[in-house]
């Protein structure tokens, strides 16, 4: 499947394209360090989100502890400045996860989210290696308000909360994929190759989230998909004082 075929369902899913003003800002050389820093943070956040879904809904206590241990070296490095950024010994989960008996679709949630976590952590490592090769330090920077803005619309009762959260995940992954594709031709050869290589897995992440949302919901998710699609497009097109990977329109 070529890039155009991969992007077709994503572009149909998103309610708007990334504004050209964001792309123009993203390709400025002075913005590249923060773009890479925020990209690394986004990959870790994506892994954490998947882990939290598993811990909240799908796995027993021992499995929950194993998930925490899996991500701890990455979180220590990013948030506590512990370690040197060598994650070669932290590439796999320490045990098989056990599904809670009361979750009907627990095994499907586990299989999709574990694969997603593995890939997001691998992407984090790849971004960090690129940062190191370019002398970009992993400084702490604030997150954009994009993900928080999306999650504000999530309902508080179950199973609607889980379904809404999964739909939000689908939009975040789809926007990431769309921006990788937009950025790739505008960057240097190394970053163009890297961002193009991410498209296939990110496109699948969007589909996995959407499939799971459909599976766990007792009713059609079409109305909620439209609701979050409109919210996501609003966030992407509104003025944003900080430049981040998922930020809105740059302010002059």
Image: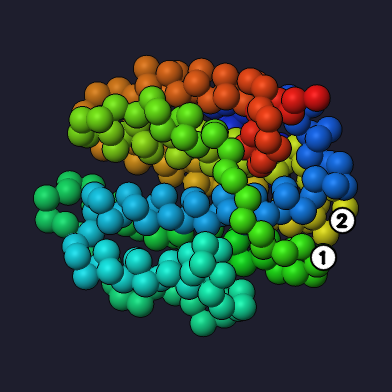
**Numbered label attached to residue 134:** 1
Residue 57: x and y, percent?
24, 49
Residue closest to the eye, 144 or 86:
144
At horizontal 82% and vertical 65% (from top left) the residue drawn is 134
Residue pointed to by mark 2: 189
- Compared with 121, 159 (above or below) is above
Q: Nearer the viewer, mark 1 or mark 2?
A: 1
At horizontal 71% and vertical 53% (from top left) the residue drawn is 36
Q: Report whether 15 appears left or right of 251.
A: left
At horizontal 43% and vertical 44% (from top left) the residue drawn is 208
- Compared with 88, 4 (above or below) is above
Residue closest to the eye, 21 or 227:
21
At mark 2, the secondary structure is helix
Quarter residue 173 falls in: top right
Question: How far apart, in angstroms, are the residues tagged by discs 1 and 2?
Answer: 14 Å
Residue 112 in view (yes/no): no
Residue closest to the eye, 16 or 204:
16
Residue closest to the eye, 218 or 32:
32
- Compared with 72, 105 (above or below) is above
At horizontal 55% and vertical 63% (from top left) the residue drawn is 78
- Of the 4 image quadrants, the one containing the C terminus is top right
Q: Could you tell which of marks 1 and 2 lies nearer the N-terminus?
A: 1
Residue 101: x and y, percent?
12, 56
At mark 1, the secondary structure is loop
């Amino acid at each position: 499947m070529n890039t155009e075929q991969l992007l077709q369902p994503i572009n149909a899913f998103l309610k708007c394209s990334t504004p050209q003003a964001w792309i123009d800002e993203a390709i400025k050389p002075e913005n590249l360090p923060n773009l890479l820093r925020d990209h690394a943070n986004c990959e870790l956040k994506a892994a954490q989100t998947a882990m939290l879904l598993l811990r909240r809904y799908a796995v027993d206590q021992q499995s929950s502890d194993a998930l925490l241990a899996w991500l701890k070296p990455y979180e220590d490095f990013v948030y506590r400045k512990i370690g040197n950024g060598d994650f070669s010994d932290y590439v796999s989960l320490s045990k098989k996860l056990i599904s809670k008996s009361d979750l009907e679709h627990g095994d499907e949630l586990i299989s999709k989210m574990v694969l997603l976590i593995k890939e997001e952590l691998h992407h984090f490592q790849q971004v960090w290696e690129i940062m190191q090769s370019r002398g970009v330090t992993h400084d702490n920077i604030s997150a954009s308000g994009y993900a928080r803005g999306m999650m504000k619309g999530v309902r508080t009762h179950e199973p609607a909360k889980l379904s809404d959260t999964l739909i939000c995940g689908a939009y975040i992954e789809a926007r990431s994929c769309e921006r990788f594709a937009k950025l790739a031709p505008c960057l240097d050869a190394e970053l163009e190759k890297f961002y193009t290589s991410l498209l296939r897995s990110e496109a699948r992440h969007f589909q996995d989230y959407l499939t799971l949302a459909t599976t766990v919901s007792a009713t059609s998710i079409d109305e909620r998909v439209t609701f979050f699609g409109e919210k996501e497009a609003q966030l992407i097109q509104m003025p944003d004082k900080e430049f981040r990977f998922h930020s809105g329109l740059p302010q002059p």
